[in-house]
Image: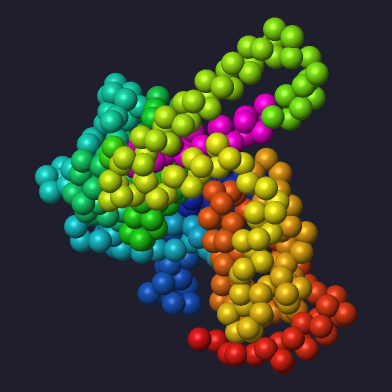
Amino acid sequence: MQEGVNMLTVTANAKDKLKEVLQQQGDSQMAIRIIPSSSNPGQLQLGLDKPREEDQVVKTEDGKKLLLIGPDLVPTLDRIVMDYQETSQGSGFTMSELAPEAKISKAPERKAGKIVQITDQTFEEEVLKSDFPTEVDFWAPWCGPCQMVIPIYEKLSEEYEGRFKFCMLNVDENQRTATQYQIMSIPMQKYFANGEAVDEILGAVPEQTIRAKVEDILKKFPTDETGGLKVLLTSWVEHNKKHGEEFRQWAEKVKNVESDPIYSRALQAAQRLKKANEQLSQALTQLPSTTGIHQAEMGAMGTMANNISLGDVQQEVGQVMHPAINRSLVDLGMVKDVALKHDVVTLTLVLPDLNIPASVKDHLVNSLRKAVAKLGSEVEVKIAEMNQEDRLAFLAMEQENWKGLA
């Protein structure tokens, strides 16, 4: 018997399913054979059989025989990928042809893209210590789906050069790193930033999915100075909003023990923090508006120095108008349970009918979020349905004040 080379490519999913089927049979001497269908010779089917000397064999990593292919079928299966898929319509094995440009006998040696070929030895330097967010494509030369995504990463590596790094790691030749990151199926794309894995994509997915992932990571881990400053400032704001409120609550409890040295030290620290916030706020006003930081962060920085009140929130929310009725959402009884805790606003949007068009529902939610955002606060919007009494009152005001959508 021979082990198949450069004939049929079997994905990890298909191998796992074949192994599962054989385990259920309980006969260690049997394997699964690909044969022409008896009813339709132009099609293939799978059946149990014992290995023969002339067979080409696909094995598991530990050497167990999985798939048997007779010599007569070997030429017809050249450049064919066998996969196992589960969908809402059903599940089963599939056979598809590799793209003509795909190379499965050795690692692709491509010059067009900016992809970096990495190893166990270079992983830390190229990925964990990278100056940019980095994608690592865990792949193998025999993996058909892996070949499908390589052109996508070549294209993106050119497009995002200098902002995002793309790497490839052959799992057969670099098992230490593959084991460390628990790579059980390929293609697996892991994304790294600041020396840590931050996201991943499993399988061969379309370009728009990969592009969206790259853009999302760049927003969270920007490589430009302006973006990095904005992330830093946002973190600063959130940290001080949280701990500033905690300090005020604590100070209220111990306001009668000002002589306590712990209180004195905490008060001094809070005063230094307030001064630092004021200095940072002053510096931000001097930044040109084109940086996108001045407008984006000043509202939040003001929140640190002057915390908003529930009255401020109620005033802003009370000005949100219905898009089709000439009354505010508050007047219509559509806003309930407005609360403020730790500078986070929670409120309930009450709808006359939960089945209203999604576009209208989204507009109402976004209008409330936008109003609260002016105060530099986070907002959580819950959705509920009106009771019968409130619904009748709403319908009466709707009939009296209807203006239609603009």
Residue 164 in the image: x percent, y percent? 28, 42
Residue placed most toward the observer, 81 or 317: 317
Q: Farthest right residue?
A: 389
- Residue found 56% across the figure and 72% down from its top: 363
Q: Main secondary structure of the magenta part?
A: helix
Q: Residue 341, can we see it?
A: yes
Q: Farthest bottom residue?
A: 399
Q: Residue 8, can we see it?
A: no
Residue 69 in the image: x percent, y percent? 39, 54
Is 331 located above or below residue 86 in the figure?
below
Is 256 located above or below residue 21 in the figure?
above
Total of numbered circles in the picture? 0
Is 256 located above or below residue 154 in the figure?
above
Q: Does the magenta stretch include residue 237?
A: yes
Left or right: 392, with 88 as reference point: right
Left or right: 238, with 336 as reference point: left
- Residue found 48% across the figure and 47% down from its top: 299
The stretch in magenta equals: 226-247
Left or right: 387, with 168 as reference point: right
- Residue found 58% across the figure and 40% down from its top: 306
Residue 279 in the image: x percent, y percent? 42, 29
Residue placed most toward the observer, 28 or 267: 267
Quadrant holding the N terminus: top left
Residue 54 in the image: x percent, y percent? 35, 48
